[in-house]
């Protein structure tokens, strides 16, 4: 069942987070708290020229927020600043609308969300990264 698959994808990222850990010499570092629950995430990135050479995260919170941060690091690694902005907008748009577009594993996040306030969980890291790209400030 699709629902089961979605759950597995999200749990896999939660249990085996990719690129988890603080990045030394980060050019981008942005912390965001979800005031509704107190969960938080910090995203880090290091640029090489215009490319995101490394992307990582730290944080604590529900499985959706942490899995989503892990997916973000995979999705944005190696992208240019402009591409990353596009990816973030596409993801946020997908979470806002009925469409699932061509966002691969990211659709799993949406697929397992049952109530609207969980959308905040899924968008936490992405909103932080977006803010970080724009020079920071929560
Ligand atoms: Fe590094 Fe997937 S684990 S990009
Ligand atoms: Fe706190 Fe999901 S319940 S971010």
Image (tube, rainbow, N blue to C red):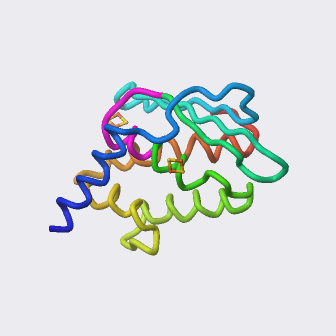
Please provide percent x and percent y for residue 108.
32, 59
Which residue, as the protein is rendered here, is positioned at the far right?
49
Location of residue 62 by image quarter: top left
Q: Quadrant of ligand 2?
A: top left
On the rendered structure, is 23 left or right of 127? right
Image quadrant in which you'd find residue 43: top right
> Which image quarter is the C terminus in?
top right
- Residue 135 placement, left or right of 116: right
Q: Magenta segment: does it hold 62?
A: yes
At x 80%, y 46%, the residue is 48
Closest to the observer, 113 or 46 = 46
**Residue 80, image x, y percentages:** 73, 57
Majority secondary structure of magenta residues: helix
Q: Where is residue 41 drawn, in percent x and y?
A: 49, 31
Going by the image, does 135 lie left or right of 75? right
Task: Choose between 32 and 24: the one closer to the eye.
Answer: 24
Picture coordinates of residue 109 (x, y %)?
Answer: 34, 55
Q: Is residue 94 above or below residue 69?
A: below
Look at 53% across and 28% down and name the residue there: 21
38 vs 101: above or below: above
Question: Is the N terminus in the top left, top right, bottom left or bottom right quadrant?
Answer: bottom left
Magenta residues span: 59-68
Q: Residue at x 59, y 61 (%)?
A: 87
Q: Residue at x 52, y 38 (%)?
A: 19
* Number of marks drawn: 0
Task: Residue 52: say if magenta.
Answer: no
Seen in the image, is 30 located left or right of residue 111? Answer: right
């Amino acid at each position: 069942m699709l629902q089961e698959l979605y759950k597995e994808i999200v749990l896999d990222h939660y249990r085996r987070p990719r690129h988890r850990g603080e990045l030394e010499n980060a050019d981008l570092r942005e912390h965001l708290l979800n005031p509704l629950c107190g969960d938080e995430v910090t995203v880090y990135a290091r640029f090489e020229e215009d490319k995101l050479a490394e992307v990582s995260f730290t944080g604590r919170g529900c499985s959706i927020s942490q899995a989503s941060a892990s997916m973000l690091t995979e999705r944005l690694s190696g992208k240019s600043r402009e591409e990353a902005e596009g990816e973030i907008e596409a993801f946020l748009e997908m979470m806002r609308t009925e469409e699932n577009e061509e966002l691969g594993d990211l659709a799993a996040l949406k697929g397992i969300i049952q109530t609207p306030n969980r959308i905040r969980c899924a968008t936490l890291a992405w909103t932080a990264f977006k803010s970080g790209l724009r020079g920071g400030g929560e």
